[in-house]
Image (cartoon, rainbow, N blue to C red):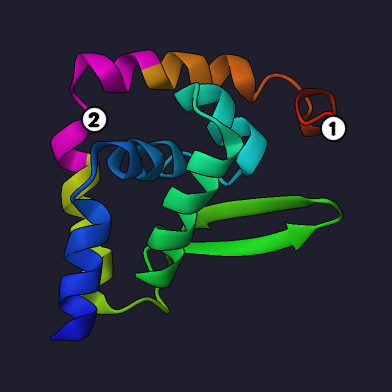
Amino acid sequence: MRTTIAILKAAADETRARILLALSLKELCVCQITAVLDLAPSTVSKHLSILYGAELVNMRKCGKWVYYSLAGNDAPKSARELLKWVIASSIDTEEARRDLKKLRKVTSVPPEDLCKD
């Protein structure tokens, strides 16, 4: 039951739902997510930490960058089903269209140019 509650709480936030939608298209580094959401890096990192703790996203480090992707088949079945529902429910909103438009611009820039210290 604890896992189910953690998954539901993690997904029940607008910002985290926006992150999940962005990650449904491709793996992104923290800088890219920050640029799309126009939020402080610390805020984005906190949201990603919650999503990671609920097993909704995977994380990998590559040099100085940290990349996130949606949880795969190794995630609990309930997490995978919730991801599908959140993405399907939010994909057709005005905010999602704005975020996806920003995402196209952000991902056209190499991460090393976008993620300068």
- Residue 48: give x, y in percent of width and height: 47, 53
82 to 1, vertically: above or below: above
Q: Is residue 82 visible?
A: yes
Does residue 71 appear left or right of residue 61 in this picture? left
Amino acid at the residue labelled 2: Ile
* 90 drawn magenta: yes
Residues drawn in magenta: 88-98
Dot 1: few (<14), some (14–19), or many (≥20) neighbours within 10 Å? few
Does residue 45 appear left or right of residue 92 in this picture? right
Q: Main secondary structure of the magenta part?
A: helix
83 to 115, vertically: above or below: below
Amino acid at the residue labelled 1: Asp
Residue 91 tag number:
2
Residue at image x 57%, y 42%? 42
Residue 55 in which image quadrant = bottom left
Residue at image x 13%, y 38%? 89
- Residue 96: give x, y in percent of width and height: 29, 23
Dot 2: few (<14), some (14–19), or many (≥20) neighbours within 10 Å? some
SS at badge 1: loop
Does residue 77 appear left or right of residue 59 in this picture? left
What's the distance in space between the residues labelled 2 and 1, CA to CA?
A: 32 Å
Location of the C terminus by quadrant is top right
Location of the N terminus by quadrant is bottom left
